[in-house]
Amino acid sequence: MAYEVAAKAAVGSPDVLGDCPFSQRVLLTLEEKKVPHKLHLINLSEKPQWFLEVNPEGKVPVVKFDDKWVSDSDVLVGILEEKHPEPSLTPPPEFASVGSKIFGAFVKFLKSKDPSDGSEQALLDELKALDEHLKAHGPYIAGEKITSVDLSLAPKLYHLDVALGHFKKWTVPASLTHFHKYKELLFSRESFQKTKPTKEHVIAGWEPKVNA
């Protein structure tokens, strides 16, 4: 039986998977666990009636488990882990929050209009901390095996790469070699290739937020 999954459609292309990193995280989990699923692409500016009926908050991603639509990517990944324990994607508890501040720091720097507000340095500090962690424990966050922490980070690092490159002409320093190797490992996985949005759609998704 295939799960039904509702994820964000691309801005301006309702038939193409959009740029929501939380939707991608859930799709990556399904792909890594080889769980069959049927994808509904939701145009967030014109949400279909059936979608609002099953999910009045109108948020993505949502997955249908036993006739009930469930939202929140943390919750969804937890349920999938419970229902499909093999291969296990549960990280050791001490690594569960590695890299968790990177996305917030990236968004702050991306939206920043003031070069002296410390947002660039704050992001660099988070990326350096991840690089140090990978140096000690890599190639993935919990060692040889990919876990849910990696699947949560992968889409966010892709957004960071694309959006900062486009809007700020900024790239992660080459000196963070473990970070760069890690990113390549993640981005080259079949599950990532199958679920990633195009760069154009990532840029289109951030445009209104950057220019707000």
Image (tube, rainbow, N blue to C red):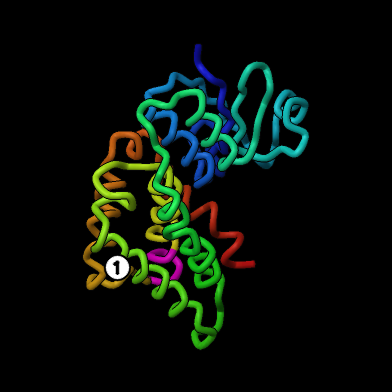
Most frequent secondary structure within the magenta stretch:
helix
Q: Where is residue 178 shown, x and y percent of the image? A: 24, 62
> Residue 119 placed where, x, y %?
50, 78
Q: Nearer the viewer, residue 102 or 169?
A: 102
- Image mark count: 1
Residue 185 position, x and y percent, is 25, 48
Give me the residue at 56% from left, 27% from top. 5
User: Is 29 above or below relative to 125?
Assistant: above
Q: Is residue 169 above or below residue 6?
A: below
Residue linked to disc 1:
132
For this view, does 126 lie left or right of residue 206?
left
Measured from the top left, where is residue 168 in percent x and y? Answer: 43, 71
| Residue 209, image quadrant | bottom right
The C terminus, quarter of image: bottom right
- 180 w.r.t. 176: above or below: above
Which residue sits furthest bottom? 116
What span is in magenta?
164-169
Q: Is residue 24 left or right of residue 8?
A: left
**In this picture, residue 104 sits left or right of residue 51:** left
Q: Nearer the viewer, residue 63 or 135?
A: 135
**Viewer-proximal residue among 26 and 46:** 26
Crowding around mark 1 (Cα neighbors within 10 Å: few <14, some 14 to 19, many 20+) is some
Q: Farthest top residue?
A: 1
Identify the residue shown where x is 75% and y is 39%: 57
> SS of the residue at dot 1?
helix
Q: What residue sits 42% from the left and 58% below the top?
A: 98
Q: Residue at x 47, y 47 (%)?
A: 201
